[in-house]
Amino acid sequence: MREFDTVQFTRMVRKIKLFANIQMGLLEKILAWVSMFSYKKGEKICRQGETGDSFFVIYEGRVSVTVREWGFFSRRLSVLGPGDCFGEMALLRQAPRNATITCTEDAKVFMLLAEHFNDALAGNAIFAEEVRRLALEREYEDKCGFSA
């Protein structure tokens, strides 16, 4: 990752509740592991049913979170923007992705592979608890038909 991207990632994650209490040593490790990817409007970052192999934090742009229902119809759960994250549910449960993420505009996202995500969880109990809390909130919202 370029030095500018590293600085931007550090600034961004310090403002996100999920990362606010992460230890500096662990944050430095995460910086070495994270990569940035660019996507065009309309591109799918991940698809429902695929293997969950990474965790994402949005740097720029917006994405739509949709779930396929009844085989043909999709329901939008939410729209996420800068500072929001996704992908944690599949990693925590070691299950296929439960939603499709589509760019509603050009986007840049930071990506952390599953093995590094798991190392980050193991390295900081507060971070692990925040990730689990977020996953439970999203699962509840999905079951109740709420959107974030």
Image: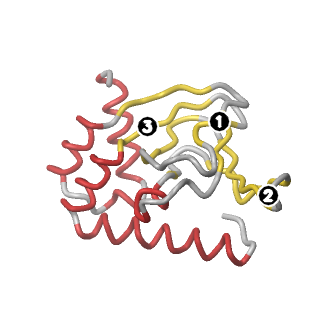
Q: Sequence-wise, which precedes: disc 1 or disc 3? A: 1
Q: Amino acid at mark 3?
A: Phe
How does the figure colour the protein chain or chains? secondary structure
User: Residue lying furthest top in this view?
Assistant: 2
Closer to the camera in the image, 51 or 25: 51
User: Residue lying furthest front in this view?
Assistant: 71
Q: Is residue 5 left or right of residue 121?
A: right
Residue in the picture at 19% in, 43% down: 29
Q: Sequence-wise, which precedes: disc 3 or disc 2? A: 2
Return the mark for residue 110: 3
Q: Are marks 1 and 2 in contact (CB under 8 Å)?
A: no
Q: Sequence-wise, which precedes: disc 1 or disc 2? A: 1
Residue at image mark 2: 75
Q: Amino acid at mark 2?
A: Arg
Labels 3, 2: front one: 2
Q: Is residue 33 left or right of residue 18?
A: left
Return the mark for residue 34: none
Residue in the picture at 75% in, 73% down: 145
